[in-house]
């Protein structure tokens, strides 16, 4: 599975790049340094520290009004390892069904480092979006062959 260069852990779109580069405040420089350190480590070592994740969330994941919490935890979430549950949220089972299949969770953790939780869409959710030999891409946007 190849990373989508415009989203998630694999990279950032123009809006995200601009936000990272222009953000101000006490945590802004530390955040920029963490982003660049992660990129450098990944490029130099060729190790996927996220274990196949396409999303990463920091403190906002543990806050009920945080972006990661709203976008990934609320729609249904499985911590694949208890050590990934940095904010003691517990699993958030929200089964769903499409005309093709059903699923138990939309997202699942792949790892956690420091205060960051790495996440991907579950295969069951991706498979339920389209019929037979197709599933959603890793970002849940388009079709890809199984």
Image (spheres, rainbow, N blue to C red):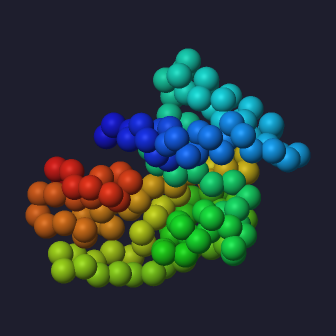
Position of residue 6 relative to residue 137, above or below, is above
Quadrant placement of the N terminus:
top left
Q: Vertically, is 120 above or below 49? A: below
Evaluate whether residue 122 shows in this view: yes
Where residue 34 sits, quadrant-wise, is top right
Q: Nearer the viewer, residue 41 or 137?
A: 137
User: Residue 81 at x, y = what percent?
Assistant: 57, 58
Which quadrant holds residue 60? bottom right
Q: Going 46% across and 45% down the picture, which residue do you hit?
A: 7
Residue occupying the point 26% across, 55% down: 142
| Horizontal arrangement in the rendering, residue 22 relative to residue 135 (left or right) | right
Residue 9 visible in the displayed image:
no
Residue positioned 67% across, 50% down in the render? 116
Query: Based on the displayed image, in which of its 4 quarters is residue 92 positioned?
Result: bottom right
Q: Which residue is located at x 63 percent, y 54 percent? A: 57
> Which residue is farthest left?
132
Q: How many marks?
A: 0
Is 126 displayed left or right of 19 in the figure? left
- Residue 43: horizontal and vertical position, in percent? 53, 22
Residue 123, compared with residue 106, is above or below; it is above
Picture coordinates of residue 14, whole percent (x, y):
52, 41
Farthest residue in the top direction? Answer: 44
Please provide percent x and percent y for residue 124.
31, 66
């Amino acid at each position: 599975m190849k990373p989508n260069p415009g989203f998630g852990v694999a990279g950032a779109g123009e809006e995200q790049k601009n936000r990272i580069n222009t953000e101000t405040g006490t945590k802004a420089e530390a955040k920029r340094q963490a982003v660049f350190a992660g990129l450098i480590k990944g490029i130099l070592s060729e190790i996927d520290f996220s274990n196949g994740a396409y999303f990463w969330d920091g403190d906002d994941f543990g806050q009920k009004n945080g972006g990661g919490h709203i976008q990934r935890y609320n729609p249904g979430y499985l911590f694949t390892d208890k050590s990934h549950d940095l904010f003691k949220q517990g699993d958030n089972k929200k089964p769903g069904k499409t005309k093709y299949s059903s699923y138990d969770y939309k997202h699942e953790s792949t790892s956690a480092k420091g205060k960051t939780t790495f996440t991907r869409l579950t295969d069951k959710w991706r498979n339920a979006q389209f019929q037979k030999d197709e599933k959603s891409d890793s970002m849940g946007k388009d079709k890809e062959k199984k």
